[in-house]
Amino acid sequence: MLDTRTEIMGIAQRYLQKVRPSGAENVMALCPFHEDTSASFAMNILNGVYFCHACHAKGNLFTFLRGLGVSRTLIDLQYKELLEEARKAIPALPDPTNPGVFSLEPLDESVLGFFDGYTLTSLLEKGFAESTIRHFDVGYDKWHSRITYPIRDIKGQLVAINGRAVYPGMRPRYKIYDKEYAQWGVAPRTTWDKRKVLYNMHTILPALQLHEQTNAHLVIVEGYKACMWVWQAGIKNVAALMGSYLSWEHRWIIEQFSGRVYLFLDNNDAGNNGTFEAGAALRSYGSTIRPYVIEYPSRLAEDVDAQPDNLTAEEVQTQFLNAVPFATWLTKRLGT
């Protein structure tokens, strides 16, 4: 039987510096994701969940290996069984109303290998760094000319792949893969429910739970690029709805921690309506969730096509720091 503790400790000692025990289940080390001098990086050696107390990098064993540049092919060949056992060791969140967020059937990780090895020029030209693209495991589907975004549940299991059209006029613009898998010898996939998943949430909730962060914040955006852009701007606790609608399953996931939830949806009617509905729903939970709204800077205030990735990194930080309580935003919208 695979000894998860020994295997993950071996990975920690291979890839980290100044590793030392911290309690029965954790190690501390120098963070590999920033210039660390005080051993700010914590990793759980039972499940691989990590969190840096300095730069706030966080995730699971898979995102750790990918963040250090280990290829998906090597991960699949060498660590597939370990990753499966590590995910099983992540404790389930309380499930009093059974929203089904743990019931999604995972995909085989090896399918992501089809999208490796391509330079994503369009994202680089828009200002995305290679490290950001690698962190989010973005790939390219040459058969269908689509940028691919792996979608994971809150335990980090791959549950879907979304392809975004590269060329103008391609329809649909975004497509969850299903029948495409048959072309690669993989069974077609038909079960998918985006209401049960928040994009990038698998890098946030486990760390919040295992490392007992308090007064946490969470930024909610609509799409993949917006999520990547806000993350690249230095705000790591960011997740995407994959639309403008906050489902009750999303609310259940968000309710697992106490703190501020910042709504940063697109600056169009759908985004504004989504902000109104999400803010009202989150506010109903009382003092544990405090909804705020990140507003667009004056130069984009009237631009109905504005999205978070239209802001500079400095603007993202500034607007985040100047976010207003949902009640204030609502009063301004209503003009009262």
Image (cartoon, grey):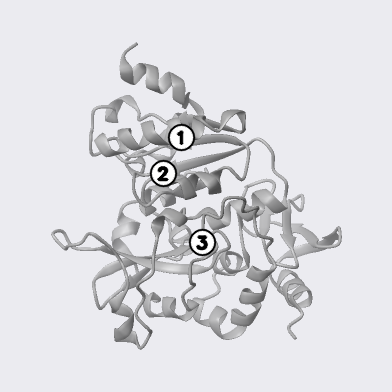
Q: Is residue 270 left or right of residue 110?
A: left
Tell me whether circle 2 and circle 3 mark residues in contact (CB < 8 Å). no
Q: Earlier in the sequence, mark 2 or mark 1?
A: 2
Q: Residue at (45%, 21%) from the top-left corner?
A: 327
Q: Do residues under tags 2 and 1 come within 8 Å of each other at their CB atoms?
A: yes
Instruction: Tell us which disc is closer to us: 1 or 3.
Output: 1
User: How crowded is the residue under tag 1: few (<14 C-alpha within 10 Å), some, or many (20+)?
Assistant: some
Residue 304 at what x, y percent from top left? Answer: 23, 35
Residue 236 visible within the image: no
Q: Is 144 left or right of 187, judged from the image as shown?
A: left
Q: Secondary structure at mark 2?
A: loop
Location of residue 188 with respect to 24 vertically, above or below: below
Q: Which residue corresponds to mark 2?
A: 246
75 and 33: which one is in front?
Answer: 75
Residue designated by label 1: 281
Q: Which of the 4 image quadrants contains residue 51?
A: bottom right
Sequence-first tag of 2 and 3: 3
Callout 1, which amino acid?
Ala
* Quadrant of image for the N terminus: bottom right
Callout 1: helix, strand or loop? Answer: helix
Q: Extreme front residue here?
A: 97
Q: Residue at x 53, y 68 (%)?
A: 157
Q: Which mark is residue 153?
A: 3
Note whether 205 is above or below 184 in the view shown.
Answer: above
Rounded to the nearest angstrom, the CA distance separating label 1 from label 3 is 22 Å
Q: Earlier in the sequence, mark 1 or mark 3?
A: 3
Position of residue 198 measured from the top left corner of the image (x, y, whole percent): 47, 53
Which residue type carries mark 2?
Answer: Leu
Query: Disc 2 versus disc 3: distance between alpha carbons?
Result: 16 Å
Quadrant, the C terminus: top left
Badge 3 marks a residue whose secondary structure is loop
* Amino acid residing under circle 3: Asp
